[in-house]
Amino acid sequence: MSKKWLSVMVLAMFVLALGLAGCGGDKQQGKKVLKIGTDPGFAPFEFQDEKSKEYVGFDIDLIKALGTKMGYEVQIQNMNFDGLIPALEAGNIDATVAGMTIKEERAKKVLFSKPYYQSGLIVAVKNDNNTIKSVKDLEGKRIAVQIGTTGADAAKKIPNAVVREFNNAPEAFMELKAGGADAVINDKPVTAYYLKQGGDKDAKMVGDVLQAEEYGIAMNKKSTELKTKMDKALDEMKASGEYDKLYEKWFGKKQ
């Protein structure tokens, strides 16, 4: 074999290797990978188990089940909540499941799946606080919230309120416990879970749910095919009763 032909063959093998490497960017051992961004400070939807250090919660179980139905291996990536949509827009992740409320403003930037959970905002105060009984009593008060959430949006609309934003819900509740805030505005299921896990020694919920909200799985605006698959898999989970089993695992039976 001449040196010329040997050089051609080596070059061809190199190009082929590059092509195969490029094709495998979103695959692992032959499986398609679905990169999911979440902020694991939103129990019981997503949080890190203290013993196993793995990410667990209703959202985590849900997206893994959906991934299985769609033929994907799910990889969870830890991110701050306010960085999730920018990461989707940049193509760094495929989707996000993070107790994200479907809002018109967000829907201008991302695609949302069909709603998978109905929630709402609630006010929490310290147990010995008997002056704040509803959102109407928060005018001029110090309010702790999670940055980038609908709770933060609601707090900013309260006249003369001093809004203090934190990276996650536990930090907001810690501020309340430490006396740095008069109240926390957050999603009711998250607040209820915090109280159930021992937070009721220091805090309590007051007033009615401020507004009904629906959570959705967010995807890049161009990911129309993924949205179709996601919605179909979600419909199948609800029809088979698999969704209800997950719901009962984390929240108990629906009332």
Image (spheres, rainbow, N blue to C red):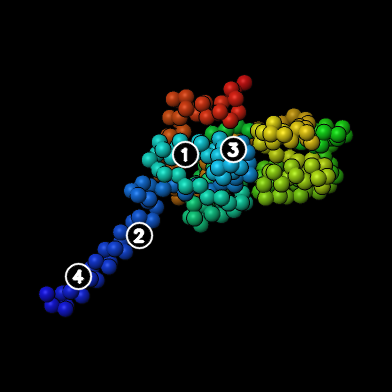
In the image, residue 100 lies at what x, y percent? 59, 42
User: Which residue lies most toward the bottom here?
Assistant: 3
| Image side of residue 28 versus residue 110, left or right | left
Q: Which residue is mark 3?
A: 45
Please tell me whether residue 192 is drawn above or below residue 28 in the rendered image.
Answer: above
Q: Which mark is residue 22?
A: 2
In primary-sequence order, the first of circles 1 and 2 is: 2
Disc 4, disc 3: CB below 8 Å?
no
Residue that badge 4 annotates: 9
Q: Report the amino acid beneath label 1.
A: Lys
| Residue 38 shown left or right of residue 25 in the figure | right
Quarter of the picture containing the C terminus is top right
- Label of residue 64 in the image: 1
In the drawing, what numbered circle is on residue 152?
none
Quadrant in the picture for the N terminus: bottom left
Say whether marks 3 and 2 touch (CB < 8 Å). Answer: no
Tell me which numbered mark, 3 or 2, is placed earlier along the sequence.
2
Camera-side mark, 1 or 2? 1
Tell me the residue at 57%/37% (across/down): 57
Q: Secondary structure at mark 1?
A: helix
Between residue 112 and residue 164, name the one nearer to us.
164
Of the residues shown, which amino acid type is indicated by label 4?
Met
